[in-house]
Structure formats: C-alpha cells, structure tokens
Amino acid sequence: MTAGLILGKLGIKYEIIEASDRYGGRIKKSDDLADGIPVDLGAEWIHTFVGGRPDVLKGIMDGTDEEFERYADTPTDVVYINNQKQIERMNIIAVTAMSMVGDYKFKNSSWFDVIETKIAPFVKDNIHLNLPVTSIN
C-alpha cells in the first residue's frame, strides 16, 4: 500500500490486489485482546534500520506525529531453547547488531492505524479485494 501511495504521487498507474476481503495484507489489529488497547496481529512493527522511509511515515519515525505517540522498543535479551532442549538467555548483541536500533511501537494505536489513516485514504480506489493471485505471467 505504501508502494502504491508513492507510485501514485509519481503519477504512475498501479493496482493493489488483496487475496482477502480486507486490505493490509499481513497487518491487522484487534481491540478485543487487551481491554480496548489496540494490539497488532501479524506484522507489528517497521524496523528502523530499513533504509526506505517514505515521507508519509517521516513524522511517525522521528516521533513528531502527535497522533501516533510511540515508545522505542529495544530488546536486550533473547530467550531460546538450545539443542539439549534447555532454556537459555543470551544478550542480543551477541546475536545481532539489531539491538543498536529500536523498533517503533505505539502507546494507544497500532501500525494498522497508521496504514488506515496515513495511507489507505489515498490508495483505496486502487485496491481490489478477494482476488488471490493464482499465477503470474
């Protein structure tokens, strides 16, 4: 959907095909799980180390968009089951450099809300629902 938004701004024709009866692909949310607090289901964050940052997300990524108050989630430990089926804890720095950057999460909204308010209004006329792709020619 973000790619569609960018293409549209460049004057390039595009179509978004969704297999299901709703847009968003893997990103969706529930308000029923945690007493009215929105919880992302499926895709739940945008990694901050990814180079592509569309203008529409700039205020969200830099923390200046007041509609989407966020906090930085920077994990420090990984818990996993080793080959001997024992639970182990390891500092994430030993696993990956991703701990040096955070993933943005929101206090009172979700990434689906971002899509719903910042992107969907501009691409909804180019979204086709209930059209699973069965082949590519």
Image (cartoon, helix red, strand yellow):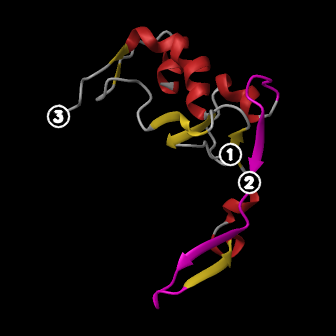
Mark closer to the chain start, 2 or 1: 1
Q: Quadrant of residue 98?
A: bottom right
Query: Is residue 75 visible in the rendered structure shown here?
Result: yes
Mark closer to the chain start, 3 or 2: 2
Query: Which numbered dot is residue 101?
Result: 2
Is 116 colored magenta in this rendering? Answer: no
Residue 69 place in picture, x, y as percent = 78, 32
* Residue beneath the point at 78% across and 43% down: 71
Is 82 colored magenta in this rendering? Answer: yes
Work out how far the residue at label 2 is from the one at label 1, CA to CA, in angstroms. 7 Å
- Whether residue 6 sits left or right of residue 58 in the image: it is left
Q: Pointer 1 and pointer 3: residues touching (CB < 8 Å)?
A: no
Q: Which residue is mark 1?
A: 48
Q: Pointer 2 and pointer 1: residues touching (CB < 8 Å)?
A: yes
Q: Which residue is mark 3?
A: 135
Q: Which residues are magenta?
A: 64-86
What type is the residue that disc 2 sits on? Val
